[in-house]
Amino acid sequence: MGDVAGTVDDPIEIDIENPEFRRALRKKYRELDVEVNANKDELTDAKKKTLSSMITKADDLNKNVKKAREQQVDTTLYSTLAESGLEMSKKLGGAGKHTAAELVTRLIHLFTHDCADKTATAAEDSGAFDWHVCGSHVAKHFAEGPSASF
């Protein structure tokens, strides 16, 4: 499909109102939905990047969604991906298995500049914790949600 201008795979000179383009977009969504449902076990495996890959593919298709029929397929796909993400998080152990102290310790080890005793450094030097890097890692989780418009 990528060799013809004006298709979902070739964003150059796309007429997004073209019925053929809209049909091709829905077809791509259906194919991705089949792929997601066929790989449900892999999606919930935290060691594999399958869920992330599928979300990236869905995000790429989502850029061209304009019609209600497409939004319905898009929403169904994201719902399936969200369910897989929930199952993955349940397999990881959930919130009940970790304490606040463990969270703080983990954050210190991830975002404190290199030194021998990161915990002592973070407690003594408030500038040792790299808030900018920490913020850039979590910022994507607080992004504005997509709007639904027709």
Image: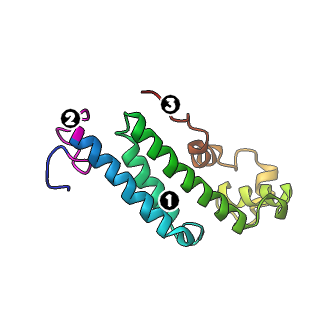
Instruction: From the top left corner, tell me how far across and down residue 26 is, in percent.
Output: 34, 48
Mark 1 touching mark 2, by CB under 8 A?
Answer: no
* Mark 3 and mark 1: Cα distance apart in space: 22 Å
Mark 3 touching mark 1, by CB under 8 A?
Answer: no
Q: Earlier in the sequence, mark 2 or mark 3?
A: 2
Secondary element under disc 1, as helix, strand or loop, is helix
Residue at 45% from the left image edge and 45% from the top image edge? 74
Instruction: From the top left corner, tell me how far across and down residue 56 is, in percent.
Output: 43, 54
In the image, which residues are magenta?
7-19
Residue on which disc 3 sits: 147
- Tell me the tag on residue 52: 1
Q: In which quarter of the image is the N terminus?
A: bottom left
Residue on which disc 2 sits: 15
Q: Hey, which residue is sitting farthest left in the picture? A: 4
Amino acid carrying mark 1 in the image: Ser
Q: Earlier in the sequence, mark 1 or mark 2?
A: 2
